[in-house]
Image: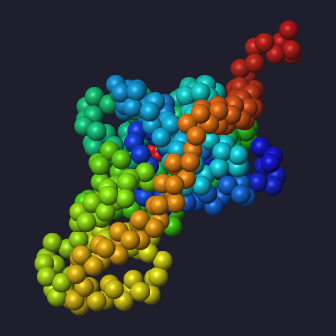
Amino acid sequence: MALYDQEKRKVVITGDRPTGPLHLGHYVGSLQSRVEMQDRCDCFVMIADTQALSDHFENPELVARYVREVFKDYISVGISPTKSTIFVQSMVPELFELTSYYMNLVTVARLERNPTVKSEIQQKGFDESVPAGFLCYPVSQAADITAFKASLVPVGEDQLPLIEITNEIVRRFNRIYDTDVLMEAQAVLGKIDRLVGIDGKAKASKSMNNAISLSDSPEMIKEKVFSMYTDPNHIKASDPGKVEGNVVFAYLKAFFEDDEELQSMKKRYERGGLGDVVLKSLLNETLQKFLAPIREKRRSIKESDILDQLEDGTKRAREVASMTIEQVRDAMSIKYWAKEYR
Ligand code: TRP
C-alpha cells in the first residue's frame, strides 16, 4: 500500500479523545465510515491523547488507560492496523510545532465563538476560568488535519465548527506565506449524525454516561435498553404513544435493518397497541446481535500486540507529518541552517 500517494488515494483523518469507551454514537457517527473508507483511501486514525488532556490534565492515568482501550475499540469494529495508520497524537511532536505556528493565525475571539467549544465549556463548568489549552484545542486539531494533508474528515456533526476553523487557518496560512502547502478539508458525516443518549437528553456521550459502549457486556446492554426513555405518557400498551423523541425508535432507526417493519411498528405504536416491553425486547435483540461479534473480536486482541501496532502506526504518521513540517518551515522561511545560507 502506498502510504502517501495523493494522486490516486484521498487522505482521510479522524480521531477520538481517549477519555472513555467508544459507544454506538461513535459507531454510526464515524467509525462505520472509517471502516468503509480504509480500502480506498489513506486513512489516519488518531488517538487524541493530548487533546484529551486539555480537559483531563488532572487525570493522566485515565487517558493512558483509554489509549489502549480506544485502540481495542477501533480493532473490534474492523479498523485494520495495516490498512489504516492508527497512531497516538502525543507521540507525533510535529503536530505541536504546527500548532504553535497556527496559533498566530486565529484570534481569541474566534476561538471563543466556536459553538462546540462554547457548549463544552458550559458542560465542563469551566465558565470564567477556561484553561488556555482547552480554548485552543481547535488549533491543535487544525494541525492534526493539515499535517497529513487530509481532504476528508469523517466526524460527527459537533465537529463541523472545528473543521471550519481548520479551513480558515489553511486559507490564511497559504495567503500570508504565499504557498499552497496546506489543504482544505471536508467533513464526512455518518449515516446518522447524532445518536441520542439513552436518557433522551442531547447526544450519547462518554462524559454523560448515557451511552451504550461497544465493549458493554450483554447484561449491561439489556439493562441500558430497558432503562431507555420512551414516551412518559405511554403507560399501557393500548395507549397511543409518541415516536418523536422516543429513544428506542431512534436506536431502531440506526440499527434495525428491516425498514418496512420499523415503519409499520411506528404506526402501531402511535395508534396504540404496541407496548414498550415488546419494543425494547426487539431493540435488545438487535443490539445484542450487532455487538456480539464486536465483543468477540475485542477478546481476540493480544495485549502484547497493542503497543507494537501503535508504535508502528505512530512511526508511519510521523514520517508523513515531518514532510509537511519541512514544507511549512520552508514557506515560513524557518530554514536558518539551510545550505543557501551557509
Ligand atoms: N475532537 C475530536 C473528538 O472529540 C477528536 C479529534 C482530534 C479529531 N483531532 C482530530 C477528529 C482530527 C478529527 C480530526 O472526537
> Looking at the rendering, in which quadrant would you find the C terminus?
top right
Query: As displayed, is residue 212 above or below residue 88?
Result: below
Image position, residue 147 (x, y; %) = 65, 37
Image position, residue 23 (x, y; %) = 42, 53
Q: Nearer the viewer, residue 47 or 111?
A: 47
Kindly identify the residue that appears in the image at 28 percent across and 43 percent down: 123
Kindly identify the residue that appears in the image at 59 percent across and 33 percent down: 304
Residue 16 as seen in the image, left or right of residue 225: right
Image position, residue 26 (x, y; %) = 46, 54
Q: Is residue 289 visible?
A: yes
Residue 239 as seen in the image, left or right of residue 40: left
Q: Nearer the viewer, residue 178 or 111?
A: 111
Q: Is residue 164 visible?
A: no
Q: Nearer the viewer, residue 56 or 143?
A: 56
Residue 205 as seen in the image, left or right of residue 51: left
Q: In the rendered picture of this protein, how many numbered marks are placed on residues?
A: 0
Q: How is the image coloured?
A: rainbow
Query: As displayed, is residue 253 above or below residue 72?
Result: below
Image position, residue 198 (x, y; %) = 29, 61
Residue 33 as seen in the image, left or right of residue 325: left
Kindly identify the residue that appears in the image at 75 percent across and 18 percent down: 335
Q: Nearer the viewer, residue 299 or 274?
A: 299
Kindly identify the residue that appears in the image at 35 percent across and 75 percent down: 282
Query: As displayed, is residue 137 above or below residue 40?
Result: above
